[in-house]
Image (cartoon, rainbow, N blue to C red):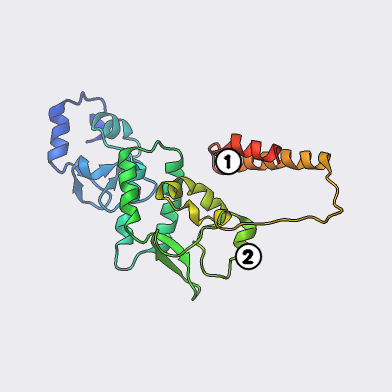
């Protein structure tokens, strides 16, 4: 029926019928209005039916004609808030979904809807932290934890049971989320003050120093452009700090 309607001119009355009546058949055999449907979500949402997996060839009808909305970061973050409020949260699923959200947020503009969703998420325990017993527990933004954004520092504190359960590359993906959450002061690179010293008879090698600075810049560019798939923020200031040292 939906396929035969693809070439039909959709007027307000036609769309209103799908809004007020349950005329969309979901994968589980239940019927839905278009308010409880969406298109192309990276993971399932409790209150929505993802029609892209049920009717993958009918995007023109559902999205262009019926105006089914695409999944957006705010919807996914609200789902995380709901999952965190469950009596037995699925921590592994929440962790992966948070990383998926991080990828989307990094490529999206930050609007009021997204900010409201992040504020709501701040109110619950949603961050996976490595526990003393070897398991994973959820903590909130005001609990005690640190974020491993530096490989060497992370290795030094690996057995201290204070780190969130994210690898270095995952922290980089989540950087935009963490910044809007106001928790970047938990980064190990911010919390730790590293002091280096050299012997009194050390001699500066300017050629080697220049080569090292150039390679360091190239490595940061690789991380930002290839691993994260978007330009790493602060390149200009980073480059200046490298060449002026």
Q: Hey, which residue is sitting farthest bottom in the picture?
A: 133
Task: Name the quadrant containing residue 125.
Answer: bottom left
Left or right of 208, for residue 89: left
- The residues bearing labels 1 and 2 have C-alpha atoms spaced at a distance of 25 Å
From this view, report whether residue 233 is shown above or below residue 166: above
Q: Tag 1, which secondary structure?
A: helix
Query: Which residue is at a point 21% across and 23% down the rendered structure image?
Result: 9
- Cβ atoms at labels 1 and 2 below 8 Å apart: no
From this view, report whether residue 60 is shown above or below residue 170: above
Give how far across and how far down residue 149 sits, in percent.
Answer: 56, 54
Front position among marks 1 and 2: 2
Left or right of 225, for residue 69: left
Q: Hey, which residue is sitting farthest top in the picture?
A: 9
Q: Quadrant of the N terminus?
A: top left
Q: Tag 2, which secondary structure?
A: helix
Left or right of 194, for residue 187: left
Per the rendering, the mark at residue 224 is 1
Please tell me how crowded label 1 is: few (under 14), some (14-19), or many (20+) other residues with Cα within 10 Å: some
| Front in this rendered view, residue 197 or 148 | 197
**Which numbered disc, 1 or 2, marks the residue that appears first in the sequence?**
2
Question: Which residue was labeled with disc 2?
Answer: 156
Query: Which residue is at a point 39% across and 47% down the rendered structure image?
Result: 42
Give how far across and how far down residue 93 sits, in percent.
Answer: 41, 59
Give how far across and how far down residue 105 sits, in percent.
Answer: 42, 42
Query: Which residue is at a point 49% across and 74% down the rendered structure image?
Result: 132
Task: Name the quadrant containing residue 204.
Answer: top right
Please tell me how crowded label 2 is: few (under 14), some (14-19), or many (20+) other residues with Cα within 10 Å: few
Give how far across and how far down residue 61 sits, in percent.
Answer: 27, 31
| Front in this rendered view, residue 67 or 163 | 163
Q: Quadrant of the C terminus?
A: top right
């Amino acid at each position: 029926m939906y396929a035969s309607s693809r070439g039909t001119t959709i007027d307000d009355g036609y769309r209103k019928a799908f809004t007020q009546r349950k005329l969309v058949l979901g994968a589980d055999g239940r019927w839905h209005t278009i308010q409880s449907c969406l298109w192309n979500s990276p993971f399932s949402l409790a209150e929505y039916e993802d029609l892209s997996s049920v009717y993958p060839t009918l995007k023109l009808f559902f999205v262009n004609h019926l105006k089914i909305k695409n999944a957006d970061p705010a919807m996914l973050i609200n789902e995380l808030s709901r999952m965190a409020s469950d009596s037995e949260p699925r921590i592994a699923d929440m962790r992966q979904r948070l990383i998926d959200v991080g990828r989307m947020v990094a490529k999206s503009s930050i609007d009021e809807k997204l900010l409201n969703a992040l504020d709501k998420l701040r109110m619950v325990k949603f961050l996976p932290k490595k526990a003393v017993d070897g398991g994973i527990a959820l903590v909130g933004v005001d609990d005690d934890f640190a974020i491993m954004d530096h490989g060497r520092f992370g290795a030094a504190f690996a057995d201290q049971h204070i780190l969130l359960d994210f690898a270095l590359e995952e922290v980089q993906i989540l950087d935009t989320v963490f910044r809007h959450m106001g928790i970047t002061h938990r980064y190990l690179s911010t919390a730790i003050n590293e002091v280096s010293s050299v012997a009194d008879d050390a001699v500066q090698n300017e050629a080697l120093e220049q080569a090292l600075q150039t390679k360091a810049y190239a490595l940061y560019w690789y991380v930002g452009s290839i691993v994260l798939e978007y330009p790493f923020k602060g390149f200009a200031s980073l480059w200046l700090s490298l060449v002026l040292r």
